[in-house]
Image (cartoon, rainbow, N blue to C red):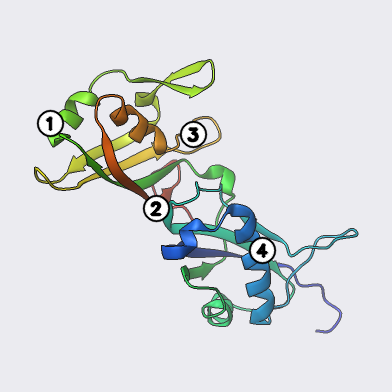
Amino acid sequence: MSGVNINKTFRIKFEKAGVAKYISHLDLQRVFSRSLTRSGIELMYSEGFNPRPKISFVSAISLGVESLCELADIKIAENLTETQVFEKIKNVFPQGINIREVYEPKTDFKNIDRTKYNIFITADGFAVEDFNKLFEGDIWFEKKPGTTANLKDYICEIAISGEPRENKLIQAVVKTNPELYLNPENIIKIISVKYTIDDYSIQKVEIYDKNNRIFR
């Protein structure tokens, strides 16, 4: 029917991996704007002197952190299905931005409660039993200048694996909601107080809601 205003929202789940993990959040916005325009999809734009595509992202991750579960919401002005949007955008992004899924969102980003991370770490003399002792009881850290918090309040699950003399894998589910938000770098900082860290990398694996279901 002609003359009908169409305003549909789709959520894009994508990987930010490899060289793309060094793309800043601001540059990521530009990448999405250019790539979606290239796809030919008719996007909705903001009003004013400098109209921009209506694209919103989940909270920014630190530069250098790889993610398997980034989310972006887009508003479009044409009547497309989830499959049609996926087919149009799957090959228009640069290397490292890999589109995993397109769907109509179930809830707002503000309802995200926790996030799962893999932390790969090499530390001199650091063993699994050391980790277990280090993360027993209360662990106080400086959340921001002049303010301390107990790490236990921010960690939902945490475990470590790895043989002696091998790199260790820490799997952690941490709070990432508006009231409690933990940057996984704080786990590294706790370990570095007692052990010399030779190398580490962080991978964002999945996002969950308050019922511990994958966020949609």
* Distance CA(mark 4)–CA(mark 1): 45 Å
Q: Which mark is residue 206?
A: 2
Q: Mark yes or no: residue 31 visible.
A: yes
> For the point 76% across and 68% down, which residue is it?
44
How packed mark 2 is, by other alpha carbons closer than 10 Å (few <14, some 14-19, many 20 or more), is some
> For the point 52% across and 70% down, which residue is it?
102
Q: Amino acid at mark 4?
A: Arg
Q: Is residue 40 above or below residue 110?
A: below
Task: Residue 167 in the image: state x and y as whole percent.
Answer: 19, 47
Mark 4 touching mark 3, by CB under 8 A? no
Precedes in sequence: disc 4 or disc 3:
4
Mark 2 touching mark 4, by CB under 8 A? no
Precedes in sequence: disc 1 or disc 3:
1
Q: Amino acid at mark 2?
A: Glu
Helix, strand or loop under label 1: helix
Mark 1 touching mark 3, by CB under 8 A? no
* Distance CA(mark 1)–CA(mark 2): 27 Å
Precedes in sequence: disc 3 or disc 2:
3
* Distance CA(mark 4)–CA(mark 3): 26 Å
Precedes in sequence: disc 4 or disc 1:
4
| Left or right of residue 143, residue 6 in this image | right
The residue carrying mark 1 is 129
How packed mark 4 is, by other alpha carbons closer than 10 Å (few <14, some 14-19, many 20 or more), is few
The residue carrying mark 3 is 181
Q: Mark yes or no: residue 9 visible.
A: no
